[in-house]
Image (spheres, rainbow, N blue to C red):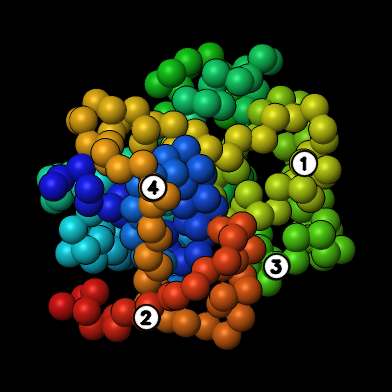
Amino acid sequence: MEKEKPIGVFDSGIGGLTVVKRVASALPTENIVYFGDTARVPYGSKSNATVVEYGLQDARFLINKNVKAIVVACNTVSSVALDEIRKKFNVPVIGVIEPGAALAAKETKNGRIGVIGTRATVNNKAYSSEIKKINSSIEVYERECPLFVPLAEEGWIRHKATYDIAEEYLKELRELKIDTLVLGCTHYPILSGVIQEVIGKNVKLIDSGVASAEVIKKELDRVDLHTNKYSSGNQEFYVSDLPTKFKEVAELFLGQEIKLVQKVDLETLTS
Ligand code: DGL
């Protein structure tokens, strides 16, 4: 039965687990299959062509797991490869940029939005163009924050170094008097405590995972693909490498225990 198939979610690594957490809480009876390309992370410093190639391979892996929809829980892939993935695969494909941009445009009061993300996401101006489509008078200031990814993966969520780096990255945005800041990388919600303190408590943080979970729910309504079951959904986790500390860090991102993580050979992805 089409409705009982799982929802597929992928990211360049473990950042997308922050999205799984939101999807599982919005749709608790749905089964989820997660793939994290931990062998090839980060995507944020790679060329668009490479990100498109990897994104298509990741989506193919999930299609082979018989998913009914794909959530691209990576801003970097969402910013360059969404159209290609939609063209190639015949299931609903939801990215994280459009939902995050729409929520930010709705929340801002002074029309000044900051966006932080990987180098690729910022260089592609993915959020600016989405936000401007909604309201061309909104000012959008995008800044790349590449060091937030390894800090999140180290679990340095309240470390002094994280405060210092956040201060360096965010001081200019603070001076630009933004009232809304998009966490435009799925790793960043892990560091939201420090980011909120440094940017100031009056700035509203937008977690694109939260926004995306609502969009996925609506999309499943639209195509009539919600599961009929009432019991809690299962979650399956696959990665292309199992680094040391993986379980600890992945559980930090997901906010719950992970019992089993299965390793996939890169050859399976690329062949
Ligand atoms: N989680 C990825 C994103 O949302 C960032 C990590 C990476 O550079 O691969 O863009």
Q: Nearer the viewer, mark 3 or mark 1?
A: 3
Q: Nearer the viewer, mark 2 or mark 1?
A: 2
Q: Which mark is residue 263?
A: 2
Q: Name the N-terminal-most of marks 4 and 3.
A: 3
Q: Residues within 10 Å of mark 2 (few under 14, many from 20)?
A: some
Circle 3: residue type: Gly
Q: Name the N-terminal-most of marks 2 and 1.
A: 1
- Taking depth in this image into account, of 263 and 156 the one nearest to the observer is 263
Q: Which mark is residue 3?
A: none
Location of the C terminus by quadrant is: bottom left
Task: Please say if 16 is above or below 199.
Answer: below
Residue placed under numbered mark 4 in the picture: 231
Q: Residue at the location (78% across, 35% down)?
A: 174
Q: Position of residue 259 (x, y in %)?
A: 49, 73
Q: Residues within 10 Å of mark 1 (few under 14, many from 20)?
A: some
SS category of the residue bearing label 4: loop
Q: Nearer the viewer, mark 4 or mark 2?
A: 4
Q: Is residue 148 left or right of residue 106?
A: right
Q: Which mark is residue 155?
A: 3
Residue placed under numbered mark 1 in the picture: 196
Task: Please say if 211 is above or below 232.
Answer: above
Q: Nearer the viewer, mark 3 or mark 2?
A: 2
Query: From mark 4 to mark 2, how far is it between C-alphas?
Result: 27 Å
Q: Residue at the location (61% across, 70% down)?
A: 249
Q: Residue at the location (37% across, 80% down)?
A: 263
